[in-house]
Amino acid sequence: MSGLLRRFGTDHPYLAAFTLFEFVFLILPSVIILVVSLGANQIISFPPSELSLRWYASLIHEPGYLEPFFNSVMVAVFCTALAIPIGVMTALGLNRYDIRFEHGIQIYLLLPFTVPLVVSGFILLIIFGRLGWIAELWAVGLALTIINIPFMIWSVSSSVNAFDSTLEDAAQSLGAEEIQTFRYVTLPALMPGVISGSFLMFMLALNEFIVSLIITTTATETLPVAIYGAIRGNISPQIAAVASIYVIIAIVAIVVADRVVGLERFLHS
């Protein structure tokens, strides 16, 4: 960020000022939540008069948040694990083969931007209700995979489009079988897109609220739904501590993505 400001600081002062304003505007809510969660009082105040970690410690013995948190993590892991093979196979298929329903698939990839999540949630509620899957936690992961899988496909497709297929021909000419070529040549070359898509799928599933609110039950309640239920009664610093956990997870995910893939490549995937 500082490098960007230095780049525009002399020749483009207005652009630098706008960039700084936008950065502060985006990051300020997260900073406020983090600061508020460190307050020692029973009532939310900013800035807090006294700093304490009591609200984070209280979460350890709070089943109302602990169980939904583990549900959210399990759903996100299931969603990511299911999305990886689907995303890789779909991206390769769309790039290399003349698929009869390719136009329909391309339209499906636009659904996250065209169909409201509340509509998708009600459709999935009807389908899962008829199948008897509503009370199943894995069904929540399946639902979030269905609505978010285009992001995985887009991410892997960027690596597929940049992949040099002559490497596969070279491997097969040296005696490698098709499965060996995929395992040792194709898949490693696609890993930046796969890792980027996995991060996206995990974070989207972990944070999804609207669809989760519609299709979850008390047994499958995820953390965003639990937070929504809590703030309807009383907004306390404990809720701010729960929200801060999401901020911390997001920061960790960004750092990991930068170390593993590189943020520039991650943002372009």
Image (spheres, helix red, strand yellow):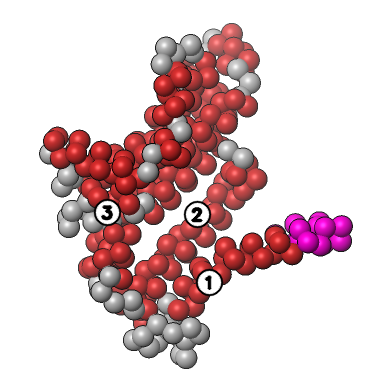
Q: Nearer the viewer, mark 1 or mark 3?
A: 3
Image coordinates for residue 123, horizontal then vertical, percent: 25, 38
88, above or below 234, in the image: above
Image point 49% across, 13% down: which residue? 97
Q: What kind of residue is marked 1?
A: Val
Rounded to the nearest angstrom, the CA distance separating label 1 from label 2 is: 17 Å
Q: Nearer the viewer, mark 3 or mark 2?
A: 3
Main secondary structure found in the magenta portion = helix
Q: Are marks 1 and 2 in contact (CB under 8 Å)?
A: no
Image coordinates for residue 9, horizontal then vertical, percent: 82, 62
114, above or below 215, in the image: above
Q: Is residue 158 visible?
A: yes
* Residue 265 or residue 24, whichever sits in front: 24
Helix, strand or loop at label 2? It is helix
234, above or below 110, in the image: below
Q: Are marks 1 and 3 in contact (CB under 8 Å)?
A: no
What residue is shown with label 1?
31
Image point 59% across, 8% down: which residue? 173
Magenta stretch in the rendered image = 1-16
What residue is shown with label 2?
253
* Residue 234 or residue 114, whichever sits in front: 114
Q: Earlier in the sequence, mark 3 or mark 2?
A: 3
What residue is shown with label 3?
213
Rounded to the nearest angstrom, the CA distance separating label 3 from label 2 is: 24 Å
Q: What kind of residue is marked 2?
A: Ala
